[in-house]
Amino acid sequence: MSSSRLSLLDLPWLPRLAADFKAKLAAIQQDDAADWGPPLSALTQQALGLTQASSLSRACRQLRAKRPSKALTRFKLGIASNATVDFIVPFLEATALRYGIALEVVTGPFGQPVQAALDPLSAINAFKPDAVLIALDHRGLPFRQDDSGMWPPYQSEAALREIDTIREGFRKHCGAICLVQSVPHRQRRCSAAWTPHSLARRGRPSPRSMPTSRELCPPAGTR
C-alpha cells in the first residue's frame, strides 16, 4: 500500500509492519541474557495494529516481571474515565516503548472516577501510580439543570468542584499528580435525510442549489 493512500490514523510516517515481527518478538522473549528493553523498543518503531500493540504490551509486562530493563524508564499511570478506555491501554504501553518508557497502566471502573479517587483501596490508589489521567468528556460532568441547550451542557462550577474532589482524593490516597484532559466541544450531526444524494432521490433541489453544510448544521449557539 502506498503512503499516499494512508490516512493520519495509519501513522504514514512510520515504516509498515515488518513480516518478521512475530519472530523477532519471540526471540526477545526467549533471550534470558540480554536487556530486553532496546530490542523491544526497536520493534515499536513501525506502524502497529491492535494485535501487535497487544503482543508488545503483554511481552513488556511479562519481561518486566522477570527482570526490569535498565535501558527503559519505568512510569505508572492510572486512568479514571467515564468512557471505556481498556482497549487503548496496549497502544499507550506500546507507544511509550518508542520513547524508552516502560509504561504500566491501570484503569478505574467505568464511569466512577469519584469513587476511584476517594476509595483508598481502589485499583488505581492501590497501584500507587506516578500520575493519574482524569479523562472525562462533557457527559461525565454534572449536567445543567435548565433546558437552554447552551454550551457547555454541564454546570461549570459544579464540574470544577467535582474535578477538584477527584484530584484531592488521588493526591491523598496514592500521592499521584493528576493530568486533566480538556473537554472537547461535542460534535454536531447532520441528519442523513439531508444529504445531497437523499434529497436528489426525493426530487428536492439539485446539488447546485443545495444549502451549505454550515447552513444545514450551524455552529452551536448561532441558531
Image (tube, grey):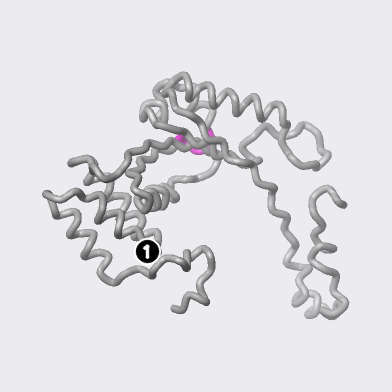
Amino acid type for the residue under numbered disc 1: Gln
Whether residue 99 is in magenta: the answer is no
Disc 1: which residue: 46
Residue 128, horizontal then vertical, whole percent? 37, 28
Task: Describe residue 110's horizontal placement relative to residue 160 as left or right.
Answer: left
**Total numbered labels:** 1
Rendered residue at 26%/53% (across/down): 38
Q: Is residue 80 above or below residue 22?
A: above
Q: Nearer the viewer, residue 199 or 2?
A: 2
Which quarter of the rendering shows the N terminus? bottom left
Does residue 154 lie above or below 122 as drawn? Answer: below
Residue lying furthest left: 33
Of all residues, the one furthest to the front in this rendering is 71
Q: Residue at x 50, y 38 (%)?
A: 110
Q: Position of residue 113 (x, y in %)?
A: 52, 31
Q: Is residue 50 above or below residue 81?
A: below
- Residue 111 is inside the magenta segment: yes
Q: Residue 175: x percent and y percent?
A: 43, 23
Q: Is residue 106 left or right of residue 61?
A: right
Residue 65 vertical position relative to residue 33 in the rendered view, above or below: above
Q: Secondary structure at mark 1?
A: loop
Name the residue at 75% across, 63% down: 191
Question: Residue drawn 52% across and 76% down?
Answer: 5
The rendered magenta stretch, by its main secondary structure, is classed as loop
Looking at the image, residue 54 sits to the left or right of residue 25; the answer is right
Residues shaded magenta: 108-112
Closer-to-camera residue (167/83):
167
Q: Measured from the top left, where is residue 61 in percent x and y?
A: 27, 44
Give whichever of 219, 4 is nearer the camera.
4
| In this picture, residue 46 sits left or right of residue 180 | left
